Amino acid sequence: MRILRYVSFLLLAALPACAPPEPPEHGNRLQVVTTVGMIRDVVENVGGRHVRVTGLMGAGVDPHLYKASEGDVRRLYRADVIFYGGLHLEAKMAEVLQEMGERTRSVAVAEAIPPDSLLAPPQFAGAYDPHVWFDVRLWSMTVPRIAETLAAADPAHAADYRANARRYREELDALDRYVREQAARVPPERRVLVTAHDAFNYFGRAYGFQVRGLQGISTASEAGTADVQELADFIAERRIPAMFVESSIPRRNVEAVQEAVRARGWDVAIGGQLFSDAMGSPGTPEGTYVGMVRHNIDTIVGALLGERGADGDE
């Protein structure tokens, strides 16, 4: 780990300081690098044919633990624009992103959201919860910031970026309505979401779910035996029908909770896999933000209503 940090430092130190990139020449696409897939998807929707987007973190990648490789540093340096989440989401990349921010137009997209709309859980050391994309209305606030950043980097296509942003926000408005309609199918007393880590608090606040995670907000915190037993007590006492695994986190801890619940005389199903810190594979419905959100709410509602069996099978 120290060697990788040292290599990255040498690469950054060797790269000459430079002014913000010039607008791309006619016929060339703006070169954009993003961190998590949710940001990549927004940029692709807003940028359209005028941008070439490289996402550093693919399906199943945990951004809390991700460290920039030598190749990532080179990609970041060659970019015209860099978009990342901020709010300590990419905690292990903080130094690299800070260095690049002094050389390349860089934007933490969560900064587009007013601080009074952010959650600051006491267990997260005074920082904000970075999982803002689970409230679709909040995530929609990042779209104008991305559009204006692209317009500033590429003024010739500014009108296209703004038009694409308006269209995409309309799509997100429709998505938000869909999530609310599906959530309303679950009786309020059954809207309890138990997951592998505490990533769904914005979802819970926006759509009326009580949320419990085994691990903390950052997966850098390990779940211990006491955490497993406490969550098992909660599930058994509330007789919760289903809990969920996540695509970017090993499922063994959730299975340990499942076994502990059974020892208490209640059988909780694993209701399916949710996408939390990473989207699905490219080319699948879950490989887009809209598809990921629709998959999550359909999986949650189906499992809590008994419309899906164990592991999310209908």
Image: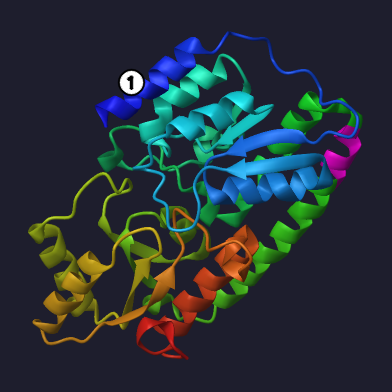
Identify which residue is drawn at 41% across, 45% down. 63
SS of the residue under disc 1: helix
Location of residue 50 by image quarter: top right
Q: Is residue 8 left or right of residue 283?
A: left
Identify which residue is drawn at 50% across, 52% down. 58
* Residue denoted by label 1: 6
Q: Give the range drawn in magenta.
A: 157-163
Q: Does the magenta stretch include residue 251?
A: no
How far from the left and from the top, in percent, is residue 99?
Answer: 48, 17
Is residue 172 positioned above or below 156 on the image?
below
The three-letter amino acid code for the residue at tag 1 is Tyr
Q: Is residue 252 left or right of residue 105?
A: left
Identify which residue is drawn at 42% across, 66% down. 209
Q: Is residue 70 left or right of residue 242?
A: right
How far from the left and from the top, in percent, is residue 2?
Answer: 26, 26
From the image, give the main secondary structure of the stretch colored magenta: helix
